[in-house]
Image (tube, rainbow, N blue to C red):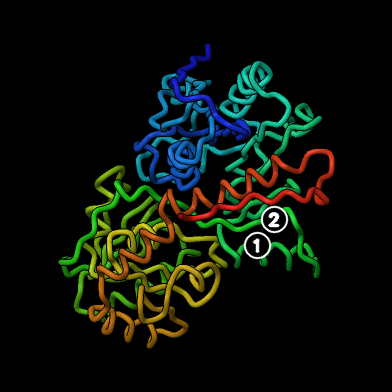
C-alpha cells in the first residue's frame, strides 16, 4: 500500500510541477548515500524548491528528502524482502535489475500513483535511465519527459541533462552524430554544502572512495601504494581482497553513510580517482573538494571539468605523474579548493541551471523551438 506525505507550501507562480521518479531499488535516505543516483534524488527536491517548484517524489520507504509531496511505493520491509543484495559491502546496483520482483512491484504502484497526479504541463524527471519505459507512452499531450542527470550509457529520451560535457560528447560520438541537439544540456552533480565540513588540517592518509572494481583503477592504486610512505585507504562497495594481498600499505574500510563521509573525505591528505573508463562525473572527487581535499585523477572524462590542474588537484597519465602529484598536492590551498567546489556544485548554483532548463521546456508550448520566450535569471 502506498503512503503519501504532503508538505504545505506557498502557491507557485508559473512553474511546472516536477515529478521525480527515484531509483526503484533503494530508499531516498542517508542509508543509501553510497548510491550516487539515490543521493541526487535526495538533494533534488531541496534544490528545486529553492526556485519555487512543487516536487512530487515517488520512492520507497520513508524518504528523507524535502520533496513537496512524497509518495512511498514499497515499504522498507517489502523492499528488503524482495532484494537480492545481502552483504553490506555488496554493490547496491546489483538490485537494479529490470524485470526483477522489486522492479515489477515498484512500477505497478508507480503507474497507479502517477495517473492520479500528472497533468498537462508537468515535467517527469528520470534520474536513473530507462527503468520506467511505459511512462513516456502513457503520459503524452503536453507532459514533458526529461532524463534529469545522465551518468549512465543507456540514454533513451530526446530531452537529456548530462552530468558533464565530456559525457554528453561521448554519447554524441557513440551515436555517430556530428550535429548537436537543442534539447540536451549539461548540469553537474549538485551537493548540499551543509553535508560537507571544510577541513584545512588533514591527516596523513591517501584515500580512494568508491566502488572496489578494476575499472575504477585499483591496479593503479596498488602501484601507488607500493611507492609512497602514506597509508592508502580503500573505502567502498566491493571485495578488496586481491588488492590487500598485493600491498601491505593498503587498508580497507567498508561503505560508510551520511555525515561519516564528510569526516573521512575531509581528513584525507588527497583523494585518488584513477578511473580507466570515461568517467561521467566522479561524484566522490567533488565531494572531497567540498571538504577542501584535493583530487588527483585520470586525465580524461569528466575530470577535465572537475579538476583544475594545480589548483583543485592534478590529472595524471603515467605512474610518474601520480607520484609527482602526491608530492605536490600538499602545497595546494585547501580553502580555495573548497571555495571553488562549493560555489560550482552547490544546490544554489546548480538549481539555477535546472531552473533555466525546466522553464524553457515549460515555455515550448505549441510553437516548440520557435517560441521566442527565453527564461533568464537576472542577478541583482
Mark 2 near mark 1, Cβ–Cβ under 8 Å?
yes
Q: Please say if 319 is above or below 312.
A: below
For marks 2 and 1, the one nearer the N-term is 1
Between the C-alphas of marks 2 and 1, the distance is 8 Å
Asked where in the image residue 247 lies, by quadrant, the reply is bottom left
Mark 2 or mark 1: which is in front? 2
Q: Is residue 373 left or right of residue 287?
A: right
Q: Is residue 172 left or right of residue 98?
A: right
On the image, the x and y values in percent for residue 174 come to 73, 64
On the image, the x and y values in percent for residue 42 come to 44, 38
On the image, the x and y values in percent for residue 74 come to 50, 21
Q: Residues within 10 Å of mark 1 (few under 14, many from 20)?
A: many
Which circle marks residue 168 in the picture?
1
> Which residue sits at x=51%, y=73%?
304
> Which residue sits at x=15%, y=66%?
201
Q: Residues within 10 Å of mark 2 (few under 14, many from 20)?
A: some
Residue 283 or 12: which is nearer the viewer? 12
Q: Name the outermost residue toward the top.
A: 1
> Which residue sits at x=62%, y=18%?
113
Q: Name the outermost residue toward the front.
A: 380
Which structural element holds mark 2? Answer: strand
Q: Please say if 287 is above or below 368.
A: below
Can the viewer see residue 194 in this picture? yes
Residue 132 or 287: which is nearer the viewer? 287
On the image, the x and y values in percent for residue 144 come to 72, 37
Which circle marks residue 184 in the picture?
2
Q: Quadrant of the C terminus?
A: bottom left
Asked where in the image residue 105 lies, by quadrant, the reply is top right
Amino acid at each position: 500500500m502506498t503512503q503519501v506525505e504532503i508538505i504545505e507550501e506557498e502557491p507557485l507562480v508559473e512553474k511546472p510541477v516536477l515529478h521525480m521518479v527515484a531509483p526503484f531499488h533503494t530508499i531516498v535516505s542517508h542509508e543509501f548515500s553510497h548510491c550516487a543516483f539515490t543521493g541526487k534524488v535526495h538533494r533534488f527536491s531541496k534544490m528545486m524548491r529553492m526556485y519555487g517548484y512543487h516536487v512530487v517524489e515517488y520512492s520507497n520507504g520513508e524518504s528523507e528528502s524535502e520533496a513537496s509531496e512524497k509518495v512511498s511505493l514499497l515499504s522498507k520491509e517489502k523492499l528488503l524482502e524482495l532484494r537480492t543484495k545481502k552483504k553490506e559491502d555488496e554493490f547496491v546496483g546489483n538490485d537494479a535489475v529490470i524485470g526483477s520482483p522489486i522492479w515489477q512491484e515498484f512500477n505497478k504502484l508507480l503507474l497507479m500513483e502517477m495517473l492520479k497526479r500528472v497533468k498537462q504541463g508537468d515535467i517527469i524527471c528520470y534520474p536513473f535511465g530507462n527503468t520506467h519505459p511505459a511512462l513516456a507512452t502513457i503520459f503524452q499531450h503536453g507532459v514533458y519527459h526529461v532524463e534529469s542527470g545522465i551518468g549512465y550509457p543507456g540514454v533513451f529520451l530526446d530531452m537529456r541533462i548530462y552530468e558533464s560535457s565530456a559525457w554528453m560528447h561521448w554519447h554524441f560520438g557513440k551515436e555517430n552524430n556530428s550535429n548537436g541537439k537543442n534539447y540536451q544540456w549539461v548540469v553537474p552533480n549538485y551537493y548540499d554544502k551543509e553535508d560537507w565540513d571544510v577541513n584545512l588540517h588533514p591527516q596523513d592518509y591517501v584515500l580512494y572512495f568508491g566502488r572496489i572494481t578494476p575499472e575504477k583503477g585499483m591496479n593503479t592504486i596498488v602501484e601507488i601504494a607500493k611507492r609512497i610512505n602514506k597509508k592508502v585507504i580503500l573505502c567502498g562497495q566491493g571485495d578488496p581482497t586481491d588488492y590487500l594481498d598485493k600491498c601491505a600499505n593498503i587498508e580497507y574500510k567498508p561503505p560508510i553513510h551520511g555525515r561519516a563521509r564528510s569526516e573521512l573525505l575531509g581528513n584525507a591528505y588527497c583523494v585518488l580517482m584513477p578511473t580507466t573508463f570515461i568517467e561521467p562525473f566522479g561524484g566522490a572527487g567533488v565531494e572531497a573538494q567540498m571538504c577542501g581535499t584535493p583530487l588527483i585523477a585520470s586525465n580524461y572524462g569528466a575530470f577535465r571539468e572537475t579538476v583544475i590542474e594545480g589548483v583543485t588537484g592534478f590529472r595524471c597519465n603515467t605512474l610518474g605523474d601520480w607520484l609527482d602529484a602526491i608530492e605536490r598536492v600538499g602545497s595546494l590551498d585547501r580553502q580555495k579548493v573548497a571555495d571553488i567546489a562549493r560555489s560550482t556544485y552547490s544546490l544554489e548554483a546548480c538549481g539555477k541551471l535546472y531552473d533555466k532548463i525546466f522553464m524553457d521546456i515549460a515555455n515550448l508550448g505549441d510553437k516548440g523551438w520557435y517560441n521566442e520566450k527565453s527564461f533568464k535569471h537576472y542577478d541583482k
